[in-house]
Each structure stands twice: as C-alpha cells, then as structure tokens.
Image: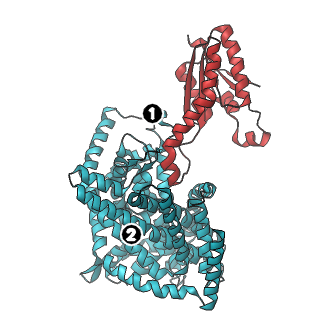
Chain colours: A red, B cyan
Amino acid sequence: MSENVILLAVDGSDGSKRALNHVRRRAELGGAKVVVAYVIEWSPYSFNTPEENAERHSRRESEIAKAHDTVVGPALSHLSEGGIEVESVVLHGNPSETLIEIAKKTGAAQIVIGRRGESGLKSLIFGSVAGNLIQTAPIPVMVVP
Amino acid sequence: MNRIIIALLATLAFASQAQAGIDESINAFTAPIAQFVGTVVFFKIPVAGAQLPLVVLWLVVGAVFFTVYMGFINLRGFKHAIELVRGDYADPKSSGEVSHFQALATAVSGTVGIGNIGGVAVAVTVGGSGATFWLIVAGFLGMSTKFVECTLGVKYRNENPDGSVSGGPMYYLRRGFQDRGMDGFGKFMGTFYAVGIFIGALGIGNMFQSNQAYVQLNTVAGGALDGYGWLVGLILAGVVFAVIIGGIKSIARVTEKVVPFMAIFYCFFAIIVILLNITSLPMAISNIFTGAFTGEGVAGGALGALIIGFQRAVFSNEAGIGSASIAHAAVRTNEPVTEGYVSLLEPFIDTIVICTITALVIGTSQVADPNFAGDATGVAMTSAAFERHMSWFPVPLAFAALLFAFSTMISWSYYGLKGWTYLFGEGQMGQTVYKVIFCAFVALGCIVQLGPILDISDALVFLICVPNILGLYFLAPIVKAEMEAYKAKLETGEIRKFA
C-alpha cells in the first residue's frame, strides 16, 4: 500500500498550488492516497522574551488554525473533489526534517513540493526547503516548478 | 504624549543647569530612605565578631535545607537537566510550544546582568577574595532552591482566558497554601509577594541596571557624561518605553538574540585575560580559598566574607527571590518537575560559570597589581582589569553592559507586571500605568549614585525572599512527591527519550 502514498508539502505559495494541481492529476490517474503536510517553521532553540513565552501556547493554536483554514483545508477539498483519499498533518519544526519524519510515519513513497523560486542570495544563505529535501530525503522528491 | 516628553526634557535640562546637577539633590533625598530600608531589612545580629543579617541566614538555611531534602538534586539532577534542555525528552506532538531551552534562555537573559560584571567586583571589594568562594557555594546551593521554586511555578500557574499564562510565587503561595487548608494565609502571602516583586522590579531589575550601564558609559567617555545622568536615563527610559509600551518587539527580539552572544563574547575575553595573567592565577585561587576561611582584612573575618558572598550570589542568580519561576511558568509540560530540573542550570551558568570567571579576572589582576583599579568599584573595576591588557575593551564592555542591563530590565518589567496584574487584574489601563512607572524608574536609576541605589535595591530583593522561602518550606513536600513520582516514571520507562 505504501507505494501509493504521496506526501504533498504545502505552504500557501503559488508553487505549492502548482504542486497541488500536479498531485491531483497524478493521484487521479494512479489512485494514490495523498498526505497534505504544512510545516510551520519553528525552532526549539530560539531566544524569546518572557512575554512571547507566555503567549506562545495561544499563538501556536492560532498558527495551526490559520494553516488549516487558509491552506490545508482548501487543498484537502480540492483533492477530495477528485475522489482522492486524503489525510492532513500540520506541525511546527524545521521544514525539511519534519517533512522527512512525516514521510516515514505515513509510509509515503515520494514527496512532492512546489518550487518557491527564491532569489539567489537568500537561498544561498538559508538554503531552500526543496533543496534540503533533495539532499537529505530517503525517498524520491519531486519538485514542481 | 510628545509634548509631555518635550516639556519634561526641558524641565530636566533647566533644572540640571540651574542647580548645577539635579543628581546631588536626588541623592540627598534617597540616601536617608536607603538607610532606613536597609536597617529594617538587614536587621543584623552580632555573631563571633561579624554582623550577620538575619535575612542572609534565612536564605542560607533555606538553600541548605532544600539541597539536603531533595537529595542533592543540584548534583544528581544535573545530567538530566542537560538532557531536557537538549530536547531528548521533547514530544514531537508538542512542537511549537515553549521548549525547555527557550524557557531557560529567557530566564538566564533576565539573570545574567550587570551583577555578573559589576556585582562580583563589589563582592571582592567589600568581602575580599574569599567572598568569591562563598559566592560559588551559594550558587551551588541556590540550584536546589531554584529547582523547588520553578517546579512550583509551573505546577500552580494560572491560565488566562486568552490562553496566555501567569505564574510565579504569588500564585503558588496562594494556591499552595489553599491546598493545605490555609486559605487566608495563602492570600496574604500571595499579595505580600506581589507587592514585593513589583517594588523589587523597580530596584534590582531596573534602577541598579540602568545606573551601572550609565557608570560604564561615562567611564568609557572619559567622564564626559558627568552630570548628564538624567539624559542617559531619559534615552534608556525611552527605549524601554518603546518596547514595553510601544510594543516595538523588534528591539526586544534583537536584544534577546544578541545577549547570549554577548555573554559568550564576555566569557571568551575574560578567559583570555585570565590566561594573560596566568602567572598570577595560582596565587589568585589560593587567595580565594584562604580568604574564605580566614577572611583576612575583611570586616567580620571569614563570616564577613561568607555574608558578602551569599548576598552577591543571590543578587546575581536570584535563587530564593522566586522571580525566575515567573519566567519558567510559561513552559507547557505535563511534568512540572522537568522545569525544576532545567532551572537548576540557571544558577550554574550565572554564578558558578560567569561570576567565577569575572572573579578570576579581578583576582588575577589584583595579584599582578594590587592597585590596578584605583578607587573604582563595580563595573568600573572589572573594566579596569580588562583594560590592563586590552585598552580597547572598555568600549565593547560598555556595550555589553548596556545590553545586559537592557535585557534584564525587559525581563524584570515582565516580572513586576505579573505582580501588578496579580494585584490589580489583567486590565490594559492598569498595565500601562505600571509600565510608565517602570520607565520613570529607569531614568531615575541613572541619576542617583551607586551607594544608596544598591542599598535600596538589595533590601527590596531580600525582603521578598521572606515570604517566598517560607512558602517553599511548606510546599517542599509537594515538590518532593512530584520528583519521586517523576523519577519512578523515568525508571519504569513510562517517560523516555524520543530522539
């Protein structure tokens, strides 16, 4: 069964919309199950003010709710329209590491992610999620331009 | 608002010219207050030729008790504390919540302040090299006190309707005593503490910080800022105002991110100075040990050195004051005791590592040249010790001092605010009133001199130790039961590493 699970990484960008459309077409053809994942960038090792810490829990809740409402929810209904079996995950963490964890847990056969096309300098310094995934993922990664 | 500020500036500028220094007049006003508050809080009993303030005895006995009662948690819990901070036990499901690392980093930013640079110099000036030894001992014992207060801080915190949390001694004193059937007493203790932390926030977490930042800036400027304390104070107050009232988070964010690097930068150069003074190091270390037990040249001898060392350690790492538990309470965990473990690293980093390094910088410089600092004390003395080898160092040190002072002020503005909201509710209007008062005291801190300021500040901080530690005694069995239950879960594997 795991051969037929596709992990779709979304972030609400145009690239991720193109990836969504691509996955819908592939899944309709091959009858795959799609796991839609949104990773909210977050590090447990950042430095915060006491006030930020005190408000953290409610912030987290609203971040997750926002991800569901604006990105994951619409993606799920778009896929369901095509009669595709879907599942969703919203997590905080390092995007590429967390996506790989999700892929392992859901037994995904491949990861599909949209290209953001960020400018040279920014991706040179910080790298890109798609780039990191290609370097580190244990399963094939498809980058949708 | 602008008009008020301009008017205030004009008045202050005029006053300073007309009276040839508004500073003196305020000093004349605060000195008697300092003396009075100091006499009441530091009520002393003569013991073997030394003057022992009862409140210091209160803290030492408390710290020793908690160390023994919790089975030397400060030693035995150390490894587990590191594992928790590293995230070994972090449940991926709760990612996005405040991590143990973040809670510790925030609390450490609040405690690593001017005390680590200037307070140690004060200790060595008044209590001799031996005070350093007792400072380290106090840091070690203080780890246990922190463990108890931070566990309670998480256990008894309050969750507000908007999802934010408020915790700290006022909450655990009230609800902890309530649980033990002492409702009225709990209410009284909670209120007493809340009043204390509010006033203390204006002293240790505010005036002392801005004062020392000004002193260091003035030293670097070669005295060019003499008589301009009011101006530096107003600028500092303005920046604090922008952050805590204006809500300009970017300033706070930058500070919180830069402070850890400043601390590392400071320690790095401090170690270089110690290495440059390496020939004096054995003598400096031997002075620390002999001074601790002979108290040579110190009023009150060894006991005098011990008193000074403990007093400075508390002032620096805040163990027993309960303030840090306000910051630690923000962590969401099913096991409050885990935050206790994490918090015991705080006195370790603050006192045993950073203060000791400062003490060695001063100690080795003293051995090499007994009069290296002249009459200077506080931050200026530490600065002079660095200057012997690196003439440029006072400038970055002034910058570091300013940032340490600033981050400590931001943290303490929050602690004081929590005391205030405990008393007057979470209303926005009241919070703004508090914040304005806080900013006014930032400015005031630059105007009065170190003497009376340090006395008032010290006294207020020691005052809130009284209800806090009394509460800790009563609630320690609860913490112990939590700790035993947690340890059992670790052993049976019910709680294990995720990794």
**Residue B54 placement (x, y as % from top left):** 27, 74
Query: For residue B461, which numbered disc appears in the image?
Result: 2
- Give the residue type at disc 1: Phe
Q: Chain of mark 2?
A: B
Label 2 and label 1: CA atoms lie apart by: 40 Å
The N terminus of chain B lies in quadrant? bottom right
Badge 2: few (under 14), some or many (20 or more) residues near its Cα, within 10 Å? many
- Name the side, left or right, on which A72 lies relative to B324: right
Which chain's residue wears label 1? B
For the question of whether residue B56 can be seen, the reply is yes
- Mark 1, secondary structure of its residue: loop
Q: Secondary structure at mark 2?
A: helix
* Residue A114 makes an appearance in the image: no
- Which residue is depicted at the point 40% across and 55% down? B325
Q: Nearer the viewer, residue B362 or B43?
A: B43
Can you give x and y, in whole percent of width and height, for residue B109 in the image? Answer: 51, 58
Q: Which residue, as the protein is rendered here, is positioned at the far right?
A: A120
Q: How many marks?
A: 2
Q: Looking at the image, is B239 positioned above or below residue B308?
A: above
Residue at point 39% right, 69% down? B461
Q: Nearer the viewer, residue A50 or A107?
A: A50
Mark found first going from the N terminus, 2 or 1: 2
Vertical comparison of A59 with B36: above or below:
above
Tell me where residue A84 appears, x and y as whole percent.
Answer: 61, 12
Q: Is residue A91 above or below residue B217?
A: above
User: Which disc, if any, is residue B498?
Assistant: 1
